[in-house]
C-alpha cells in the first residue's frame, strides 16, 4: 500500500524538475512512511512512498525492468499475483523479486493495456514504456485505490494518489468548479471524474489512460463494468452453499501479508461475516488469533459495540474497542486536510478513529465494505422499491400531478424516521426511478439547494443539476431491473465517491492498509448474477447473504435494525459544536465566496439551535465546506 506520483512531459523534450517531483512525493508521506524514492529520465519523473506489506525486502519502487526501459509506480495489492507470475514465467519472463509489483510490470510488457483485465486486486498504477513512448495509467475495477490527474497549461501531465500531490503545482488553477459544488451539496462528496477544482480530475474506477509523446489528448477509457446478467434459477440451498464458499474464498485470497493483519468489526452483518471467515470456522472449528477493532459511542442510540463483542467472543478474537465522544469534533480540520476537497460524511470521524486504533495493533485490516451494495442491504433500497411499486401502478399522467401536489402540501418532517416522512415519499413517487432515487439519497434535496445558493451562483451553473451524474450512469446501465439499476448507480457514485474515499484517506492517514474482500471484482460479478428477489425479499435486505451466514453468526446480529456507522451529529451541533457552527456557517469565509444565500444560512442555524428543525446534515455539509476553504487557503 503506497502513494504514487508522476510528471510526464507530453512534448517529450523537457527535463523534469526534481524538486517539484520531490514535493509531490513528500505530500503523501503518510501513505508510505517506510521508503520514498524518485526516478527521473528525460520527459518523465515518478515518485513512490512505500508501506511495506508483501516482499518487504525487495519490493522497492519506482520499479524498472532489467533493460531499464520500462518504469512502474504501483499502489495496491494484486491477490492473484502468484498465478500470474507462473503464467508469465511460462512465457519466458524472468523475475528478480517475489513482489506483486514486478508481476504488474511484466504483465504490462506481456499484454499491454489488456494487462488490467488479468489483475485481481485493488490498484492504481502508472507505467512508462520508453520503447513505445507511452505512459499508461489504470485504476482498479470498483475504485478501492484512488488516482488524480491534470494536464497543465504548460503541457505537463501530472498524476498522484491524492489531490494534494498534484495541487503542489501553482500552475494548477484553484478556481472552484461550480458543478462540483452543486454535486457536493447533493451527494456529500464530489463524484468521479470531477474534483472540486477546475482542470483536476479523478480517474474513474475500471478506467485507464494511455498517453503518447507528442499527443496532449487525455481520453479515459473504460475497461471494466459490472454486468447484471442473472443466472438461471437454482434451489436456494444451493445458492446459499455456493455463496458462503465465495465469501470464504474472497476473504482467504486477501489474507496474505508479511506484517500483522486483522479486521474491523462493527457488529454488523458484513464485517462479522469477514471475521467469521478469517477465523476459519468450518465444522465447528475456530482458529484463534484474529485481531479485531471496533469503535463505539457514549450515546447508546448509536453504539453497537455489544454486537461486535458477541462476534469477538464467539470467534475468540483479540478484540480492541474505543469510544468516540464529543471531543472528537476537533478532527474537522484534520479531515479537511486528508480529503483535499469538501467531504460531508460525518462517519469519517469514527472511521478515522477505528483506523487509528487498528494501526496500533496491525498493519493490514480487512473490512466488510461492499456487502450492502452487492446485496441491497441499505434501507434506501427498500424504500426505493416500495416507492417504485406504487409508481409502476399509477399512470404517469395521474402520478406526477397527484403525488407532486401531495409532496408540496405535506409538512416537512426531517426529524422523523424515513418511513414517516411522507413528504419525501410523495415527492419521490412523483418522479421517475432515477430521479426518485436521487431525491431519496440527496443530502440536500433540490428545493433546499435552491434556497441555499445565491442567485449569482445558480446562474453560474448554467442549468446543470447534480442528478445529471446519475442520469449519465443510468443511460449506460447494463440492466432494466429497478433494484439492479440503483445498485449500479451506487457502484458508480456512492461506493467510490463516499465509502471507499472515506476509508482510503482515513486508513492512509495512519499508514494502515485496508482490504475489502466483499468488493473483490470476481465476487461482485458473481453477486450481480443473483436474482434481485434473493437480495431484497419481504423488506429484508441481504436476504440470501444472511441465510447463508445463519450457521456462522448469531440471529440478532443479522436481523436487528441497521444503525449505520454514524455519530450523534444533531446533538453535537446543538451542544459542544454550537459556537463552531455559528462561526463557520455565518462567517465571512462562506459568505465571501458568493455561493450562498446568507439569509437562508441564518435560518438554518437559528432553527437548528432552537430545536424546531434538524438541519444537522446541511450544517455539517457547510462546516466541512468552510473547513475545506480554510485548509486549502493555508496549504
Image (tube, helix red, strand yellow):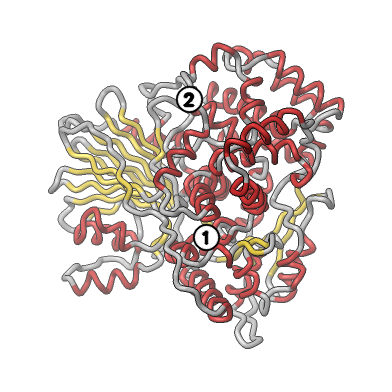
- Closest to the camera, between mark 2 and mark 1, is 2
Q: Is residue 146 left or right of residue 272?
A: left
Tell me the quarter of the picture where residue 85 sits: bottom left
Mark 2 and mark 1: Cα distance apart in space: 34 Å
Q: Indicate the position of residue 533 as horizontal and vertical percent values.
A: 58, 65
Q: Which residue is mark 2?
A: 464
Q: Is residue 227 left or right of residue 568?
A: left
User: Above or below — where is 379 with respect to 543?
Assistant: above
- Residue in front for this viewpoint, 175 or 329: 175
N-terminal of the pair, mark 2 or mark 1, is 2
Residue farthest to the bottom? 283
Q: Residue placed at 55% from the left, 80% from the top? A: 235
Screen quadrant of the N terminus: bottom left
Q: Indicate the position of residue 185 as horizontal and vertical percent values.
A: 59, 30
Residue 351 visible in the shown view: no
Q: Residue placed at 55% from the left, 54% from the top? A: 483
Q: Secondary structure at mark 1?
A: loop
Residue 418 visible in the shown view: yes
Residue neighbourhood size for the residue with mark 2, other residues' Cα within 10 Å, grouped as few (<14), some (14–19), many (≥20): some
Q: Secondary structure at mark 2?
A: loop
- Residue in front for this viewpoint, 40 or 479: 479
How many numbered discs sit on the rendered protein? Answer: 2
User: Above or below — where is 116 with respect to 260?
Assistant: above
Residue 516: which numbered mark, if any?
A: 1
- Residue in front for this viewpoint, 445 or 172: 445
Q: Indicate the position of residue 312 as horizontal and vertical percent values.
A: 71, 70
Q: Residue placed at 16% from the left, 46% from the top? A: 130
User: Above or below — where is 87 with respect to 472?
Assistant: below
Q: Residue placed at 54% from the left, 16% from the top? A: 457
Tell me the quarter of the picture where residue 232 sits: bottom left
Q: Indicate the position of residue 152 as horizontal and vertical percent values.
A: 31, 26
Amino acid at each position: 500500500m503506497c502513494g504514487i506520483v508522476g510528471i510526464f512531459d507530453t512534448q517529450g523534450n523537457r527535463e523534469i524538475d526534481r524538486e517539484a517531483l520531490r514535493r509531490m512525493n513528500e505530500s503523501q508521506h503518510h501513505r508510505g512512511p517506510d521508503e520514498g524514492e524518485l526516478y527521473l529520465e528525460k520527459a518523465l519523473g515518478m515518485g513512490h512512498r512505500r508501506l511495506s506489506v508483501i516482499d518487504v525486502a525487495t519490493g522497492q519502487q519506482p520499479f524498472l525492468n532489467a533493460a531499464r526501459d520500462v518504469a512502474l509506480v504501483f499502489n495496491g495489492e494484486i491477490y492473484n499475483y502468484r498465478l500470474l507470475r507462473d503464467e508469465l514465467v511460462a512465457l519466458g519472463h524472468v523475475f528478480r523479486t517475489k513482489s506483486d509489483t514486478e508481476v504488474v510490470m511484466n504483465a504490462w510488457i506481456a499484454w499491454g493495456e489488456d494487462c488490467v483485465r488479468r489483475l485481481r486486486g485493488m490498484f492504481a498504477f502508472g507505467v512508462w514504456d520508453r520503447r513505445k513512448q507511452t505512459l499508461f495509467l489504470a485504476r482498479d475495477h470498483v475504485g478501492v485505490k484512488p488516482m488524480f490527474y491534470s494536464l497543465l497549461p504548460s503541457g505537463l501531465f501530472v498524476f498522484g494518489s491524492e489531490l494534494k500531490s498534484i495541487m503542489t503545482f501553482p500552475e494548477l488553477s484553484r478556481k472552484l468548479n461550480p458543478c462540483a459544488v452543486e454535486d457536493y451539496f447533493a451527494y456529500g462528496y464530489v463524484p468521479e471524474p470531477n474534483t472540486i477544482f477546475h482542470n483536476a480530475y479523478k480517474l474513474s474506477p475500471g478506467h485507464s489512460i494511455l498517453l503518447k509523446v507528442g499527443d496532449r489528448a487525455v481520453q479515459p477509457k473504460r475497461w471494466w463494468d459490472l454486468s447484471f446478467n442473472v443466472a438461471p434459477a437454482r434451489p436456494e440451498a444451493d445458492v446459499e452453499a455456493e455463496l458462503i464458499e465465495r465469501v470464504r474464498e474472497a476473504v482467504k485470497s486477501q489474507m496474505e501479508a508479511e506484517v500483522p493483519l486483522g479486521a474491523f468489526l462493527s457488529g454488523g452483518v458484513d464485517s462479522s461475516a469477514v471475521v467469521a471467515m478469517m477465523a476459519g470456522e468450518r465444522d465447528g472449528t475456530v482458529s484463534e488469533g484474529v485481531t479485531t477493532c471496533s469503535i463505539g459511542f457514549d450515546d447508546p442510540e448509536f453504539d453497537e459495540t455489544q454486537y461486535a463483542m458477541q462476534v469477538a467472543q464467539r470467534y475468540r478474537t483479540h478484540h480492541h474497542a474505543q469510544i468516540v465522544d464529543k471531543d472528537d469534533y476537533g478532527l474537522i480540520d484534520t479531515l479537511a486536510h486528508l480529503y483535499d476537497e469538501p467531504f460531508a460524511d460525518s462517519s469519517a470521524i469514527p472511521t478515522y478513529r477505528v483506523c487509528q486504533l487498528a494501526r496500533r495493533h496491525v498493519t493490514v485490516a480487512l473490512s466488510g465494505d461492499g456487502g450492502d451494495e452487492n446485496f441491497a442491504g441499505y434501507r434506501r433500497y427498500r424504500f426505493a422499491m416500495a416507492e417504485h411499486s406504487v409508481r409502476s401502478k399509477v399512470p404517469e399522467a395521474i402520478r406526477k400531478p397527484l403525488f407532486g401536489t401531495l409532496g408540496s402540501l405535506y409538512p416537512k418532517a426531517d426529524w422523523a424516521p424515513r418511513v414517516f416522512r411522507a413528504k419525501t415519499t410523495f415527492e419521490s413517487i412523483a418522479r421517475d426511478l432515477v430521479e426518485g432515487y436521487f431525491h431519496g439519497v440527496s443530502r440536500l434535496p433540490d428545493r433546499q439547494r435552491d434556497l441555499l445558493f445565491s442567485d449569482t451562483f445558480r446562474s453560474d451553473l448554467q442549468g446543470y443539476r447534480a442528478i445529471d451524474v446519475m442520469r449519465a450512469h443510468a443511460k449506460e446501465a447494463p440492466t432494466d431491473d429497478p433494484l439492479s439499476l440503483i445498485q449500479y448507480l451506487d457502484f458508480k457514485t456512492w461506493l467510490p465517491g463516499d465509502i471507499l474515499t472515506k476509508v482510503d484517506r482515513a486508513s492512509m492517514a495512519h499508514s494502515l492498509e485496508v482490504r475489502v474482500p466483499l468488493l473483490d471484482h470476481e465476487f461482485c460479478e458473481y453477486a450481480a448474477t443473483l436474482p434481485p428477489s434473493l437480495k431484497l425479499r419481504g423488506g429484508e435486505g441481504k436476504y440470501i447473504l444472511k441465510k447463508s451466514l445463519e450457521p456462522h453468526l448469531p440471529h440478532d446480529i443479522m436481523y436487528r435494525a441497521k444503525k449505520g456507522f454514524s455519530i450523534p451529529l444533531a446533538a453535537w451541533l446543538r451542544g459542544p459544536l454550537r459556537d463552531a457552527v455559528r462561526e463557520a456557517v455565518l462567517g465571512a469565509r462562506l459568505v465571501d465566496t458568493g455561493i450562498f444565500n446568507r439569509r437562508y444560512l441564518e435560518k438554518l442555524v437559528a432553527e437548528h439551535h432552537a430545536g424546531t428543525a434538524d438541519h444537522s446534515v446541511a450544517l455539517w455539509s457547510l462546516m466541512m465546506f468552510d473547513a475545506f476553504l480554510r485548509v486549502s487557503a493555508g496549504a
